[in-house]
Amino acid sequence: MAYEKIKIIILDCDGVLSDGQIVYDGKQVESKSFSARDGLGISLLRFSDIRVAVVTGRRSEILQQRCADLKIEILHQKVRDKQQKVEEILAAENLQWENVAYMGDDWNDYPALKMAKLSACPNNVEPDFKSKCQFVAEADGGKGAVRQLITYVLKSQGIYDKVIANFLANLRS
């Protein structure tokens, strides 16, 4: 299988984990919309040896809370050079680019995305960017695209059914 060596899925936030909209109220409080399906998909990964990291160009307390809720331990915000940051993550985790699936949604993700073993994007990205990705989700960012990537990776590794069975068994305990 082509993706059996993937050990980490690295995600952008705006346009991937969220729908890309950044909404401020009158007090400059930011809100974002996240997909519960993506969240459950990330939870499934706890029953595999695949980790999740989020690398984003913006800083958001809401994202920090979402990552805490999902037990995502690797979160880097306000990152300008995402390729360099991913290289730091890989060094810390003793991984290589061949171990990476990366989902981004725009050109600031491209330097890291092109290095990954599996490059991925949501369906609602610019056509030029979409053409650079090996995996294009049917879903849009913030609407289940991450879940589709996770399912694809787990199935490509032949462990999807085992992960689901372990997840369901854990619900009963």
Image (cartoon, helix red, strand yellow):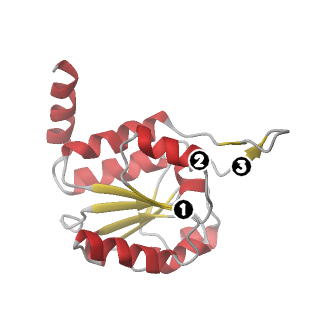
Q: Earlier in the sequence, mark 2 or mark 3?
A: 3
Which of the 4 quarters of the picture holds residue 13?
A: bottom right
Check disc 1: other Cα within 10 Å, few if <14, some if 14-19, many if 20+. Answer: some
Residue pointed to by mark 3: 22
Is 20 or 120 nearer to us in this picture? 20
Give the numbered dot on residue 77.
1
Residue pointed to by mark 2: 61
Q: Secondary structure at mark 2?
A: helix
- Mark nearest the camera among 3 and 1 is 1
Which of the 4 quarters of the picture holds residue 27?
A: top right
Q: Earlier in the sequence, mark 3 or mark 1?
A: 3
Q: Secondary structure at mark 1?
A: loop
Direction right: furthest residue: 26
Residue 29, placed above or below residue 75: above
Direction top: furthest residue: 172
Dot 2 amino acid type: Glu
Residue at the image position 58 percent from the left and 43 percent from the top: 62
Residue at the image position 31 percent from the left and 73 percent from the top: 90
Residue 154, placed above or below residue 172: below
Residue 22 at least partly seen: yes
Q: Secondary structure at mark 3?
A: loop
Dot 3 amino acid type: Ile
Mark 2–mark 1 CB contact (< 8 Å): no
Q: CA distance from mark 2 to mark 1?
A: 10 Å
- Mark nearest the camera among 2 and 3 is 2
